[in-house]
Amino acid sequence: MKVQIFKDRLRLVWSWQRKRFWLYLGLPDSIVNRKAASMKASQIELDMASGNFDPSLTKYKPQKQESISVSDLFDQFIEYKRRKIEPATFAKYLSLEKHVSAFFKNKSTISVSETVAEKFRDWLLFDRSLEPVTVRERIVMMNACWEWAQKKKLVLENPWEEVKVSVAPKQRPEPFTLTEINAIVQKFRSDSNLKHYADYVEFKFGVGLRTGEPVALVCRHCSHNCDHIWIGESLKNGNRKAAKRNKDRTVPLTPRLQQLLLSRRSTDFQPDDLIFTSIEGRAIDSRVSSSNLV
């Protein structure tokens, strides 16, 4: 079984029972398409070995790709994503939609080769308003769109798999020192406008949770003596959801943080009572944090 280039397109050539076969794949030569050709070759070889080979080759011929524009495909994809992602993340897809429409206009998905995909990447990089890390994120979205479209049989190949974006490393800011952390916590404890949030701030420094995780904590997440706490949920803009990547973890607490949580537990606490709240007794919300501190 060989993969050949014939008139700028890939084809498979092999022999079976002393007969020569050619299968024209209709794909231009590229890394992605050669992978697809190798997969097709493996399928044919397996069929010949198992006695399931189709000499008419109908079983192996490429299905006809629908003539759908890139813009229409991406519109369908973001409608699919709308039901599955947070509004802030969905806004990134809407931003990319504008770039897709501007670059591809009415072009069909059939016309998008790996070279065209790379040109789109370079076009995004030329936009000085977009950082390379943002462009990389956008290319990942385009790859996800084509993967989804392949499952829906809207496209046959994915030209985005090998498109890469180089992002220069950046030095991370220095973390707070222990002295600085103590000074910040003491500022919260000594200021009448801030002291309500002092335990919350100290707990965040002590455990190192993501922003939405400590505000989502409720009493049932604590062990009976508060020596460890379960982290598996996040709260943002009033919406409770699973922790990032749907991964939970149990975090052991220092004696200091253990006593901090015990001191906040009322004698008649309920399992779903929030551990940290705003001054008004509601969930802490970053959108209104400034009003909570006055």
Image (cartoon, grey):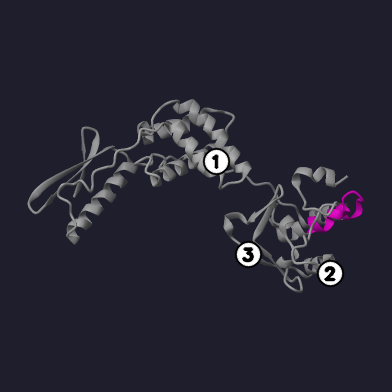
Residue topped by disc 1: 168
Amino acid tagged 1: Ala
Q: Is residue 184 left or right of residue 101?
A: right
Q: Residue at x 34, y 43 (%)?
A: 32
Amino acid tagged 2: Asp
Q: CA distance from mark 1 to mark 2?
A: 54 Å
Which label number is shown at residue 249? Answer: 3
Out of 205 and 91, give the one closest to the viewer. Answer: 91
Residue 169: give x, y in percent of width and height. 57, 43
Looking at the rendered image, the disc whose residue lies closer to the viewer, 3 or 1, is 3
Q: Quadrant of residue 205?
A: bottom right
**Disc 2 packing (10 Å; few <14; some 14–19; many ≥20):** few
Work out whether mark 3 precedes mark 1 in sequence or the reverse, and give the earlier one.
1
Residue topped by disc 2: 268
Q: Residue at x 49, y 31 (%)?
A: 100
Residue 239: give x, y in percent of width and height. 68, 50
Residue 48: give x, y in percent of width and height. 17, 56
240 vs 108: above or below? below
Residue 196: give x, y in percent of width and height. 86, 54
Q: Is residue 87 left or right of residue 28?
A: right
Q: Which residues are magenta?
A: 188-202
Q: Quadrant of residue 181?
A: bottom right
Looking at the rendered image, the disc whose residue lies closer to the viewer, 1 or 2, is 2
Q: CA distance from mark 3 to mark 1?
A: 32 Å
